[in-house]
Amino acid sequence: NDACRLLAADNYRAAGTVEFLVDKNGKHYFMEVNPRVQVEHTITEEITGVDVVQSTMKLASGKTLKELGLTQDQIPDPMGYAMQCRVTTENPAHDFRPDTGTIDVFRMPGGMGIRLDDGPGFPGAKITPHYDSLLVKITAKAQKRKDAAAKLVRALREFRVRGVATNKSFLLHVLENDEFLSGVVDTGFIAANPHLLEPLKEKDRAQKLLHYIGEVIVNGTPKSLGAVGPPPSVTDPMIPVLEPKPKTKPSLKETFDKEGPEAFAKAVRENEGLLITDTTWRDAHQSLLATRMRTVDMLNIAEANNVALANAYSLENWGGATFDVSMRFLRECPWDRLASMREAVPDIPFQMLLRGANAVGYTSYPDNVVYEFCRLAKETGMDVFRVFDSLNYLENMKLGIDAVGQAGGIVEAACCYTGDVSCPDRGLYDLEYYLGFVRELEAQGIHVLAIKDMAGLLKPEAAHMLVGAIREEFPNLPIHVHTHDTAGTGVASMLAAAKAGADAVDAAMDAMSGMTSQPSLGALVASTAGSDLDTGMTLEEVSRVNDYWEECRGIYAPFESGQKSGSADVYIHEMPGGQYTNLLYQSTQLGLTGQWPAVKNAYAVANRLLGDIIKVTPSSKVVGDMAQFLVANKLSEQEVIDQAETLSFPKSVIEYFQGYLGIPPFGFPEPLRSRVVKGQTIPGTDMSCFAGRPGADLPPMDLAAEKQ
């Protein structure tokens, strides 16, 4: 009535819109008159069935409301509820500032009860600051208010606009707000709910995938991926189907799940025959293929693995370099990888590599980070945690051991091996050193001892001596031996270790074994068949799984290092198998192509300069960085010592001498250390070097805040 009175007083003779504000008491306050059909006319049309635009045009041509059947008594009662929202190119997070750009993707929704009145939106449209920012009006109709809102939410989630910012996030937040849905909001609604302006985190997966495919087709594989070898095989590997066998005894996984890690260790010691860990899913491809194996290629063979490796000690499938490589290069989530593997392989223990206080990183972390990491890993499906420190520094290992123990995992503490216990002239790392370190580990309450030979230096005679001495002193402690086959003696060394009392050894499927990887799993199965060391696996089933890996490896041809055979010079340079292929590629990237023999020789020199240390990530990276530094700058061993105060050493080398990794078994070499750290300070302190465990004084990380 007030609207009609207002316009009649001015002799208004056309369609128009009068706007009012209504307060909580039902009183209305005049705002404005628009001498045209208002934007919200779609609401009227949807709930009355009257075509407002058409009627307006007829009125302008001379028709009367009575002739059009639009007198108030003839207008039908509202049919249900209608609700409209306007999608604009305005950014709610920046005070609804209009955005500009080119629309890459424009896909509008549809379905029953959805009406679209679109504007200038289409793929390729250029949005400038000189036009109305409206892209489309979406109107939803339903029998109830909340149902209409739900339809709008569905339509907005289906609506895709890429290339410019929109107010879609704001609209969704409003439509999912209970206060709004109840219809009691006022003009202070937005101010009282600032979260309405928060942006949505949309994945935009399809567009990213198209951009990536286009980039690879036009410009080739990104150089950062390291795909420098020949093209991949075009043959999809055949996935074998193996018939499951009935169980004759509980699996090690069942024993652990039901009775705990102590029962697992007891079952390992009581097992008749040799247990095997298959490293194909972790260390094998880390050593041969720069850690580039995708999750899907492991899941494809998971069912066959369940059968062929039912009697395995474990599947090594996580940790080490796989964690960061899966994120940085493969664009996969390592946690999703572990969870999907656990689902696919429910009855074989999983094993990971934990870098003590470094977890799966390359530096020390606050203690609570390591504890939380281990808890999540165990919760997501990990069983055996091989805990090691790159310098055999017990203080670093204690943190990892305690964190795994608190998480309820199996603590497999590693004694990292270097040197040659069978050679009396080798120097510092003799049999007594290793026995002393094992005594310290055993005192920590570990469940299993691992002898971790990262470079393949454990010769058959040395394996017999070392394992035999440990078994004699620790008759109840399970022993698990890890090596690399760089020199070609891996199978012989593992058999020697087993005969001396080792309970389990590491091996890889034949097609993924040898050279810098682990010894051949098939060879160990065949060599022990029918003997006291019988693995309980059949060569026929293992060979079926290996057939898959023979074909699958061809897919990763671009990541092959080019290494054709093993090499006994590993006994000279002592380079870890997992580092060999990575350092070879890095040397090429640094312009040292053709100087690989010089880099290997420099690796031995660098090791001596650093004090003849245990070499495994991250300490092996320090040695590798130093070796490349020597070759690139054409420096001799003596020149480094003499010029140390003036040389710009790699950051990793400086931090090593500052104690960032801990303290090596026989201390830091002098005077080189003092010269390198002269004038250096640890950030946030006035110290030049750490005196003990580097992470001991780090404050706890606020994990909740980091998650946000």
Image (cartoon, rainbow, N blue to C red):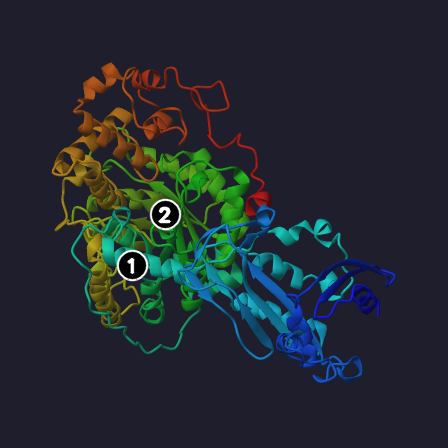
Residue 84 visible within the image: yes
Label 2 element class: loop
The amino acid type, in three-letter code, at marker 2 is Gly
Mark 1–mark 2 distance (CA, rounded to whole Å): 32 Å
Q: Identify which residue, 137 or 365, lies in the foreground.
A: 137
Q: Is residue 313 among what the camera can see?
A: no
Q: Is residue 317 left or right of residue 110?
A: left
Above or below 69: residue 375 = above
Q: What residue would you read off at disc 1?
A: 214
Circle 1 sits in a helix, a strand or a loop, which is it? helix
Q: Are marks 1 and 2 in contact (CB under 8 Å)?
A: no
- Residue 540, above or below 367: below
Label 1 neighbour load within 10 Å: few <14, some 14-19, many 20+: few
In the image, which disc is placed on residue 320? Answer: 2
Q: Amino acid at mark 1?
A: Gly
Image side of residue 166 versus residue 360, left or right: right
Residue 266: percent from left, percent from top: 44, 57
**Disc 2: CA contacts within 10 A as few (<14), some (14-19) or many (>=20):** many
Compared with 652, 412 (above or below) is below
Which residue is rendered at x = 44% and y = 69% of the image? 250
Task: Say which quadrant the N terminus sits in.
Answer: bottom right
Q: Quadrant of residue 432?
A: top left
Q: Is residue 245 left or right of residue 399?
A: left
Q: Nearer the viewer, residue 676 or 573?
A: 676
Name the image quarter holding residue 653: top left
Give whichever of discs 1 and 2 has the lower sequence position.
1
